[in-house]
Image (cartoon, helix red, strand yellow):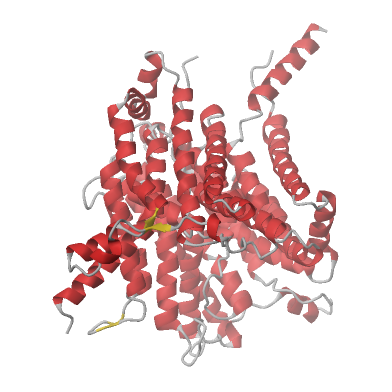
Amino acid sequence: MSRELPAWIDIGVLPALNILMAFVVAGLIVLIVGENPLEALDVLVAGAFGYPGSLGYTLYYTTNLIFTGLAVAVAHHAGLFNIGGEGQAYIGGLGVGIAALSLDTVLPGWLVIPIAGLAGGLFGAAWAFIPAWLQAHRGSHIVITTIMFNFLAAALMVHLMVNVVIEPGQMSPQSREMAEAVWLPFVHDILGGFGIEVAPSPLNVSIFWAGLACIFVWLLIWRTRWGYAIRTVGRNEKAAVYAGIDPKRVIVVSMVISGALAGFVGLNELLGVHHRLLLNFTAGYGFTGIAVALMGRSHPVGIVLASLLFGALYQGGTELDFEFQTITRDLVVVIQGLVILFSGALAFMLHPTALKLWRGWTARREAA
Amino acid sequence: MVDLAEFWLLFVLTLDATIRVAAPLILCAMAGLFSERSGVVDIGLEGKMLAGAFAAAAVAYVTGNAWLGLLAAMAVSTALALLHGFACITHRGDQVVSGVAINVLVAGLTIVLGIAWFSQGGQTPPLPQGGRFQSIAWPFAAEMQAVPVLGQFYAEVLSGHNILVYVALASVPFTWWLVYRTRFGLRLRAVGESPSAVDTAGISVTFLRYRALLFTGALCGIAGAYLSTAQSAAFVRDMTAGKGYIALAALIFGKWRPVPALMACLLFGFLDAVATRLQGVEIPGIGQAPVALIQALPYALTVILLAGFIGKAIAPKAIGVPYVKER
C-alpha cells in the first residue's frame, strides 16, 4: 500500500482544486452582490483576449507579474518570505528613472537602456539587501523588515518626487518626459515593421527580458551550485551548515537576486509605457507576485502560467467596470486574496482527505 | 516669538491629536499581543481592522445605531481571526501567508461590497447623527478651559474624546491584567513560549490559541469601528492606510508587553500628529519640513530596533511555528 500521494495528485490535482475553490468562493461573492458569476467570467475572458489589443494588454500585465512572481519564488526557495517586492520594484523604478533621466540626452538610446536596466536591478537589489543582511547577521525577521521597507520606499519616493525629481512648473509630482531614444520599442511597432498589423497596446520588449529572467531562474535554482545551496538552506538550514553551506551568504544572495528581479518592473512600466518617473507605478504588482509565486509553486513554468492568468484577470477586470453596475476590477483583488488563502495558507487542507482516498483506492485495487 | 503659554497650548493640542491618532493603534497592538503571545504571527491586523471599519460603517448607516455598528465590526473581525486560526492552527498553514491573504482579501472585498451595497465608489454614505460615537465632554471641561496649564490639559487632553478612545486606553490595563494576572494569561504566555510543555500539562494548545484569537478579533473590530464611526463619519476605501502594520511595529517596539506597546503607540501617534502639524511649515535652515520622512520614522525605528541597535526585541519563542502534536 502506498503511504505517499503520487506526484500527479500532489502537484497537479491538489493545487488545481485549491485554485478552483478560490474561484468558486469568488463566484459566490459575485452571486451575493446580485450578478451572474458565469456572466462575469465571460466578461473577464472577453476583456482579456476578446478584442484587438486586449491580448497585448494582458501580456503587458503578465510581464510585471513574471518579474515579481520570480522575485517571491527565488526568496521562497531559500525559505524566505519576501513581502517587499512592492518596495523593491518601486526603488528599482527609481534606479531606472535616475539612469534614464540623467543619461538620455548625453548617450545614445541603445546604451542608456541597458544601463537603466542594470540600475533598476541594482536599486531593487540594494533595497532587498538591507533586510537580507539584517536577517542574516542581526536576526531581524525578514517578513517584518520587508513590510517596513515597503512603507519606507513609499515615503522616500513621495519625498523625492515632490521635492527633487518633479518637473519645474508642474503641479503633479512626476518627472519630465524621457527622450524618445530610450523608450522601449512597443511590440506592435516591431510587428508593424515586419508588415504584421496588430492593435496598439503597452506591450513592449521587456516581456522578452521577463522570458530570459525565467530561464535564468530555472538555471540558477536547478542547475547551479548556488541553486543547490539556496534549496538546501530553504529545506533545512541546520543540514545546510553541515553540508558546508553558509546560510548567511545564501540568505543575502537569494534576496539580492529577488530584489533585482522585482526591480525590473520599473523597466516595463517606466521605459516601456509611462516614459517618465511617477508615483505609484507599482500598483500592487509586488503583492500579486505573492499570489503568482504560490500558485505557480515557485517554478518558472508555473509562474508564467500564473502570471498569464493574473495578467488576464487584471486586463479583464477593467472590463468589469464597463459591463456591470455593481462589480468592478476590485473583484480581481478579491480573487487574488482567495488564491493566496487557498493555495498558500490552506495548501494542505485537502491533503489528509486526498491521502485517505488514495490509500483506500490502492488498498481496494490490491485486494481485487 | 512663541511665548511659554502659547507653546503649552500648542503642546496640549498636539497631545490631544496624539491620543486621537493613537487610539486605533493601541487597540490593534493589544489585539496583536494576544495572538502573538499565543504563538500565532498576525500580519492580518490591517485586514481585520479594515473589515471592522467597513462593517461598522455599513451597519451604523443602515440601522442608525453606532453600537450595532460596533458589534458588527467585532463580529466580522472575529470571524476573520477564526479564519486565520482555521488556516494556521487547524491546518498548520503558513501564518504569514494567511495574514497576507486576509489583508488582500479584505482590501478587495470591502470595495466590492461597498460598491454593490451603497454605489458610492466603495465608500459608505455619511453616517447619521446616531450612527456616530460622539465626543464626551467631562464635567466642567468648558469652564476649566480658562484655567491655564492644568485646566487646558484637563479640557483638551482628558475630556472631549469619544467613548472608544477611553475603551482603547482601558484595553491596556485590561490586557495587562488578563495576560499577567489570570490563569488564562499564564497559559497564554506559556503556549507562546513552549506549546509542548502546555500540551504535556494536559491543556489543549489548539483551544488556547483559538481563544487568544477571539480577543484579537474583538479588539481589531473595535479599532476598525473607531476609524469609521468615531474618528470620521463614513467608511472610505483603504481607510486603515497601514495603521495595522504600524500597530504591529508598536507591538514589536513594546517587546510584546502591554505598557511599553502603549508607549510605542503614543510615540507613533505623536510623530503622526507632529507630521500633520508640520505640513507646509518652513523650518529655518532646513526649508520645507520633510513630512513624508517624519511619517516614515515609525517604520525606520522598528527596523533599527529589530536589528538590535537600540535594545533587543525578543519575540515569544514559539511564534510562527505551527504546533504538531507528537504522533
Residue at figure coordinates x 79%, y 71% from the top left:
A53
* Rendered location of residue A122, percent (x, y): 44, 66
Residue A14 in percent (x, y) is at: 69, 33
Q: Quadrant of the N terminus of chain B?
A: bottom left
Q: How many marks?
A: 0
Q: Residue at x 83, y 8 (%)?
A: A368
For this rendering, which residue is in front, A85 or B129? B129
x, y percentage for residue B26? 36, 49
Residue A155, image quadrant: bottom left
Residue situated furthest bottom in the rendering: A169
Indicate whether B24 appears above or below A176.
Answer: above
> Residue B200 or B229: which is nearer the viewer?
B229
Viewer can see residue A122 = no
Q: Is residue A242 above or below residue A19?
A: above
Q: In terms of image quadrants, where is residue A15?
A: top right
Residue at horizontal 73 percent and vertical 65 percent from the top: A318
**Closer to the camera, A117 or B242?**
B242
In the picture as drawn, the residue positioned furthest to the left comes out as: B4
| Vertical position of residue B218 compared to residue A317: above or below | above
Does residue A90 appear to the left or right of A24 in the view shown? left
Above or below for A288 versus A153: above
Where residue A92 sits in the image (x, y, percent)?
Answer: 48, 67
Q: Residue B41, located in which quarter of the rendered image?
A: top left
Residue A167 visible in the picture: yes
